[in-house]
Every structure is written in structure tokens, then in C-alpha cells.
Amino acid sequence: MTFKHAEKFPPAPRSIWREVGEETWNDWRWQQQNRLKSLADFERVIYLTDAEKQAFLHCNEKFKIAVTPYYASLISPIDLHCPIRLQAIPSPLELNTSLSEKEDPLTEEAQSPVSGIVHRYPDRVLLYTNHNCAVYCRFCTRKRKVGNPASMPDRDEEDEAIAYIAEHREIRDVIVSGGDPLSLSNNRLERLLGKIHAIPHVEIIRVGTRNPVTLPQRIDDELAEILARFRPVFVMTHFNHPRECTAEAYRACRKLIDKGISIFNQSVILKGVNDSAETIKQLNQRLLLMQVKPYYLYQCDEVFGAAHFRTSLEECLEILRGLQGWTSGLAVPRLVVDLPDGGGKVCLEPNFLGKEADDFIFRNYRGERFYCK
């Protein structure tokens, strides 16, 4: 079946991989095995400044560098402000740290009763599955774990985590995260999801993955079929910029949607990447064409090396103001702050102005005030 507006999603340019055959290019294992990791790899694809070359060497000691050929092909070879480049390529600014930055900004380790489990909210837990990602995003909240093989739970730890979920009957929602769970083999992923799905009181499973963005080839028919066996399954993904909405990403999302799997998007507002209402509006409108629901809009966490990405809360509110009323409500996510020290998520609403006597005061998208009881 042909879906309306499919032609609006351009395929990724092949760049230096133009001679790679179609079948090879669309093989997710080839993409994973041929990720760009070394300075020489990146210099074949894009122009790097001397400062970036130095940053590349120093940053690699603190947080791994890897980019799939597919995602690298979205990077402008010469534009230093390319939004894909800024997310994937180390910057000298990563070496500048402030006192407010933390290794574990959301205090996940303190809320981990057993290895691999974060239990912050009463009825849901996060299950950390592995350390690997197709692309190591430079603003990653879990830099302390992601990319470090020692952080990956072994079989005994995985069994202990599953046992914890089984023993706590209040848990109805399990978020399978990482790293990226889709970095696991199909067999390993199916076995893990099967264990979770077999727990009677678990009602839904969420799979947190950026593969639709950075490695859409991973979402093939076999994977979609596996995920569909454990419905209700929700895929939580992470598009940040309209340039990431390619034909390949569109096809990947369609494979999941066609199997009855809902997809929700969580964007992070990143300075220089998407810190404008117009960029977020374009992104979310394109996501809706892919049948992906814009869900959350985050302020960047205070993790080491990410201060240059961080916008103020007022800037975040201004972006939400520029969405509400100016586009469909379906394209307006909730603006969420993930509180430090494990406080959890809270939503911000820019158009509620407070209360006066018995009246609640609101402002509409035109800036007009209204009083409601």
C-alpha cells in the first residue's frame, strides 16, 4: 500500500558509499560493522577543523565515538553547524565542564535496587539491557555506562532483574532501554521480551531505541514480527531534527506501524541543533506523516560535556509557546523537565499564568489573557 506524502521523505545521500550495493547498504549488520570510529574514518567523509581533531582524540578517552555510514551520510561535509554533525561529532566544547554537571545527573544508580533496574516510579521500571548504540550521541545522559562493555548486565544479573520485576506486583510497565536494546541479536531480544511478557502483572512493554533515526535498516520484517508477538509494545524513539526524517526512517516506522506497534518520539532541545519553534514544528509535522506521535520535549540533562547543548527553561517554554495554537495539537509534545537527583519528570505549561482570587489565568496562542473558574 502506498501512503500519502511518502515522496516528502528523501533518501539518505550515499556520500562516499555510492558504490556500495543496495542490498549491502540496507544490511543493518554491515552498517553496524562499518561504523566510523577513527579520526581517519571521519576525515574521509567530512572536513574537520584542527580543534575538532584535537577534541576527537581527547573526547574518545571519555566517551566512545561511533557513527553508522547511514547517519554519517546525513552530515554536511563542510557545514560546521550541520545539526547531524553537532549530535554525532565530538566538539572541543565537550572538554569544558561546569560544577553543575554530573556523571549521573538523574541519580539512576541510587534508585537501582538490583543491577540493571531503575525503579523511580511506583508502577514502572527501566531495564538496562546493554552498553551498545549504533551512534553515540554527544549529549547522552548515560555516558557513564553507554560504550562501556563492563556496564552490560551478564546473564545472572539479567535473571536477577527479571526476578525483581516478577516479585514486585505493582510493576505494570517495563521500559527496555540501554544503550540500545535493538543492538541485541534478534534471538537475545526475543528471549528477553518473552521473559518480561510472561510476568502476569506486566501489562505493557516499552522499547527505547534510536535505531529508527540512526540505523533504520535494523527495523526489518523479522524484527517487526518479533516485537509484534509481545504486544502491547510501544517503541519510544528520538528524532531531534527534520533532516533525520528520511525515506529510510519512514520505511522503518511503517514496518512497525503496520504490525500494530505505536511509536512515540522524545526530542531533546539542543542549542544550535533544534532550539527554535519552527524547527521543532517542522520535525513534529513530519513525524505525524510517519505516524509517529511527538510525546516529550526535554531540556538537555546536566551530564558531563553537554553544557554547550543546554538551553534555559525559559527558552524551552518559548519553543512550546511557538507550537501551541500554531500547529495541530497532535504535533505539540509535552515539555518535560527530568529533575536532578532522581526527582522524576514534571511538565511545564507556558500559557497558565497563575491564579487570581477564584480565577485561573490563561494566555492563548495570540497572547490574549482569559480568566476561567
Image (cartoon, rainbow, N blue to C red):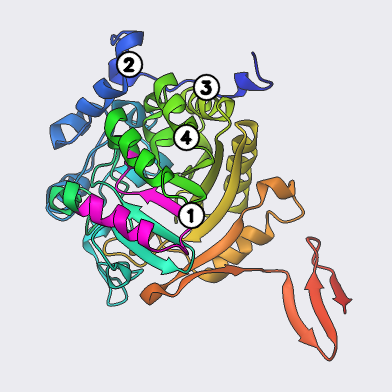
Disc 1/disc 4 C-alpha distance (Å): 37 Å
Disc with the residue nearer the chain's start (4 vs 3): 3
Mark 2 or mark 4, which is nearer to you? 2
Q: Are marks 2 and 3 in contact (CB under 8 Å)?
A: no
Task: Examine the image and state in which quarter residue 107 appears.
Answer: bottom left
Can residue 344 be seen here? The reply is yes
Disc 2/disc 4 C-alpha distance (Å): 17 Å
Q: Are marks 2 and 1 in contact (CB under 8 Å)?
A: no
Disc 2/disc 3 C-alpha distance (Å): 16 Å
Residue type indicated by callout 2? Trp
Question: Is 53 positioned to the left or the right of 134 in the image?
Answer: left
Question: Is 344 positioned to the left or the right of 148 in the image?
Answer: right
Q: Are marks 2 and 4 in contact (CB under 8 Å)?
A: no
Residue corresponding to mark 1 = 201
Magenta-tinted stretch: 157-181
| Figure check: 195 above or below 169 | above
Residue type indicated by callout 1? His
| Figure check: 310 above or below 203 | below
Circle 2 sits in a helix, a strand or a loop, which is it?
A: helix
Disc with the residue nearer the chain's start (2 vs 1): 2
Magenta span has 178? yes
Mark 3 or mark 1, which is nearer to you? 1
Residue at screen point 28% across, 41% down: 133
Q: Residues within 10 Å of mark 3 (few under 14, many from 20)?
A: some
Q: Residues within 10 Å of mark 1 (few under 14, many from 20)?
A: some
Disc with the residue nearer the chain's start (2 vs 3): 3
x, y percent for residue 167: 36, 61
Circle 1 sits in a helix, a strand or a loop, which is it?
A: loop
Residue corresponding to mark 3 = 10
Mark 1 or mark 4, which is nearer to you? 1
Mark 2 or mark 3, which is nearer to you? 2
Disc 3/disc 1 C-alpha distance (Å): 43 Å
